[in-house]
Amino acid sequence: MNFSLQERYRAGDSLLHRLDPRIKVVVTLVLIVGIVMTPSAAWPAYALLWVLLGGLALLGRLGFWRLARTAGLALPFSLAAATLMFTTPGNEVLRVFGLVVSDAGLARFAAVLLKSWLAVQAALLLAMTTPFTDLLWALASLRLPQTLVAIIGLMYRYLFTLRDEAERLMRARAARSGSAANHRSGGSLGWRARVAGGMVGSLFLRSYERSERVYAAMLARGYTGRMRALDPPPLRWQAVVLGGVPLAALAIIQLLAARWWA
Amino acid sequence: MVGLNERVMSHHTIEVENLSFRYPDGRLALDDVSLTVAPDEKVALVGPNGSGKSTLLLHLNGVLRSPTGTIRLGGLPLNDRNLGQIRAWVGLVFQNPDDQLFSPRVYQDVAFGPLHMGLPEAEVRARVERALAVVGMGDYAERVSFHLSVGEKKRIAIATVLSMEPKILVLDEPSAGLDPRARRHLIALLRDLKQQTMLISTHDMRLAAELCARAVVLDGGRVVAEGPTEHILNDADLLERHGLEKPF
Ligand SMILES: Nc1ncnc2c1ncn2[C@@H]1O[C@H](COP(=O)(O)OP(=O)(O)O)[C@@H](O)[C@H]1O
Ligand SMILES: [Mg+2]
């Protein structure tokens, strides 16, 4: 069994990799909000946004097409918006099982798909050029509560340990699941469900016990309920200026969209 | 105040008297244990699995508390008032480094103790660097903990307490799960830490023989023997009776 739990981060030392993570977080958030707020029918704006993101991908040496393809993996989630096709009033273009698809509906659905694809690209740009641990301190210095940051950090730290534990459990099951000749192995469905249930339970118990030991280890080193962290490095003005470039591009695209294509 | 602490710590002993402890499920894990470790002395706590070694060590900086018996560290009785001070004095290294290394990055883990002692930033950074250098892991500061090998994790686990500059080091089965080379590294590393009082739980008899002049044998939650490590290790009968074996 192979878990698709993996880090998105791609090591490198491009300009994008080296940019202050605080700036990257802020720029990414603004880009995503900007993408989502683009007027739905401003088709040329989508193309320009894509060029902007693709340019950033090239800057980060991530590959224009690779970023586009990876972001495509998230598209099935936006299928939830498919009902827009039927519920938006407009001229009929198609009938599916007696349901009317309107032209306006189709356009809105396409806009949702494009927007989510672009927004995922923006998020991926951040994730692929920023180590997770840098994201954590960036979030902390952007005033996300210290406790929340600590929880995300612990989750990140132990997710992989947990995955290894799950893999060990499954290997142990596989090793003991030989099948006699001419017999289907694994027993009945009910039996197998019980085994799987036991494994989940065992995984939960192990995690629970680990959490107690980790807490003890934190207490032993002076933790009293308040998380402390080192001060982040100072923010440099060069980073702020660099961060301003994509935001300026976004502003221009939005102005064009509002003026001509809305 | 600082002067007082320093005077008290000038004899950083471990003193345990008549300590008993029962887990909530009713299991008596420690049964009237008494033990003293002199300043700068290194003592091995040997015993088979389940003999209560970890339980005893967890008492030494107040992770577990028992109503019966008394514990004094560096002369201070372990109680609510002294808990913070004692945790700064006693470095406890857990058996499983995955429990000890809970931060995403090595650097943050080594900085955790000094930060929570309330030290100023510059001092924290200096201590992190020193501690990593002592365990020979200076290049690992920016690494992510879960990608390291067990041997590397163990050494960093030790660095996480060395950065607190404890006078007393308590290690729970430090050599468990290490390959021979990592084990040699560890023994050399611990041998070089001469300024600390140490209590090392183990069933690695060679480690005990190489590091500690004195050994205490624990079985079934009781101290069943105590004396020079050499004597204990040559008493085949005693070792046999308590599920241990001669090292050579
Ligand atoms: N959290 C716990 N709850 C109940 N019993 C425990 C717990 N931890 C350990 N024990 C029991 O206490 C005894 C001593 O355990 P431990 O101190 O871990 O031994 P050692 O470290 O020498 O192997 C064992 O019998 C063990 O089963
Ligand atoms: Mg133990």
Image: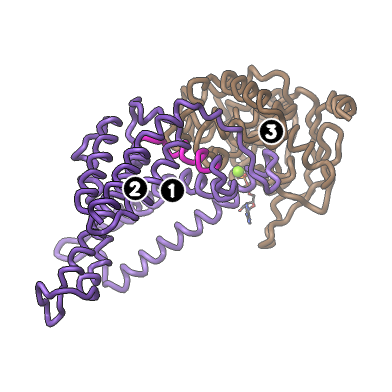
Chain colours: A purple, B brown
Tag 2: Cα neighbours inside 10 Å, few (<14), some, or many (≥20)? few
Question: Magenta region, mostly helix, strand or loop?
Answer: helix
In the figure, is residue A102 to the left or right of B200?
Answer: left
Q: Mark 2 — residue?
A: A5
Q: Amino acid at mark 1?
A: Leu
**On the image, which quarter does residue A6 sit in?**
top left
Q: Amino acid at mark 3?
A: Gly
* Cα gap from disc 1 to disc 2, whole angstroms: 9 Å
Tell me residue B98's x, y (percent): 52, 41
Image height check: is A175 above or below B114?
Answer: below
| Residue segment shown in magenta | A129-140
Image height check: is A16 above or below A25?
Answer: above
Considering depth in this image, is B68 or A64 the residue closer to the camera?
A: A64
Residue at 59% in and 19% down: B134
Image height check: is A123 above or below B138?
Answer: below
Which mark is drawn over residue A159? 1
Kindly identify which chain the residue marked by label 1 belongs to.
Answer: A
